[in-house]
Amino acid sequence: MKMTPRKDKKYYYDWSDKVVYRILKNKTYMGKIVKRKSTKKSHLQKKREFISIRDRETIDNCHPAIISEKLFNEANDKLLKLKRKEKNDYCGLFSGLVICGECGRVMTACRRNDRKNIQYYFSCTKVAERKHCPNRTIADSKLRSIVSGILKEIIDDYVDEDDIVNKATKNLIKSERPNLKISNLKDDIELHNTNIRNLYLKKTKGEITLEQFLEGKKNETLLKEASEKLLKETLESKNENIRKSDIVEKYKHFLNGDEFMNIALRDLVDKIIIYKDNTVKISFKFGLGKPKKIKLF
């Protein structure tokens, strides 16, 4: 099918997202024609009233259809669930996951400037019959606090912390091979002791000067002390209880950090639905428990 370009109409050559959106919403491809886009109540009315797309009357079977009505409806249903382009450069965790419970559209991330701080919030930007969606807005920080608490509860229910810590401790000690490291350090310390004894013998026989003896002894002593310090640290790290306490601390730090939030949110959360009655519903993937409903206040 060849389109005839009109004067000063660039979209015939530049297929932007707006042009594709108009094509997906155009019922002409189903063989239908729209009767009118505006109307007048009487001939005395000067200005015509705009008819919204949902209220326009169409005439069926006016020309051969390119696509079926079923395919058209499926495409438009997916269009409603697509992630909307976020305003104000929002690149947070909840982009595309927050759904309006009133109209089913993806809520848009907006921002407001509070002195020097930038605060993000989610709002439904749907406009129907020149009226905005009645749903409430919710702050990104508030949503993060709610979801983080629920994900931690799920982790506590499904994950055995003691089992993870024990396995991680054993694998860590095994991978570090401390016995081999301890044996090598002991050999290094014995070698430095031998070198110091040899320096004493050479000084006694007059093979080296006093300055050479003192300099050599100083170097060997420093190397020996460094090996002894490393040996002490290795022996302490071999202690399973000490390593276990370190891993527990790192595990708790991981659960409270952004890295855990990034992984758990994308892997476990399917969608977050916001209702105007101050209720938040969180649905999970893989049948991971029933959806959680929370009353904000």
Image: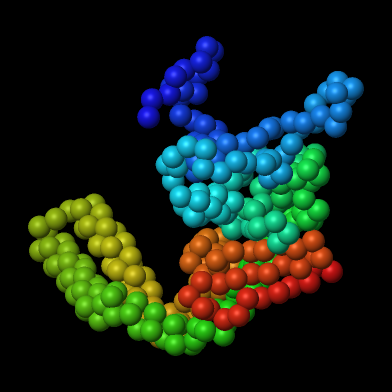
Q: How many marks?
A: 0
- Give left or right: position of 81 versus 210: right
Quadrant in which the C terminus appears: bottom right
* Residue 135, position as x, y percentages in the image: 78, 56
Tell me what residue is drawn at x 44 percent, y 87 percent. Answer: 163
- The structure's colour scheme is rainbow
* Residue 181, position as x, y percentages in the image: 25, 75
Front residue of 236/187: it is: 236
- Give left or right: position of 242 versus 138: left
Tell me what residue is drawn at x 47 percent, y 37 percent. Answer: 63
Residue 67 can be seen in this image: yes
- Give left or right: position of 269 versus 71: right
19 versus 182 height, above or below: above
Residue lying furthest right: 44
Residue 21 can be seen in this image: no
Residue lying furthest top: 7
Front residue of 291/74: it is: 74
Q: Quadrant of residue 45?
A: top right
167 versus 46 height, above or below: below
- Give left or right: position of 76 versus 138: left
Tell me what residue is drawn at x 66 percent, y 76 percent. Answer: 292
132 versus 288 height, above or below: above
Q: Quadrant of residue 60?
A: top right
174 versus 123 height, above or below: below
Front residue of 83/62: it is: 62
* Residue 235, position as x, y percentages in the image: 35, 80
Tell me what residue is drawn at x 59 percent, y 46 percent. Answer: 84
Quadrant in which the N terminus appears: top left
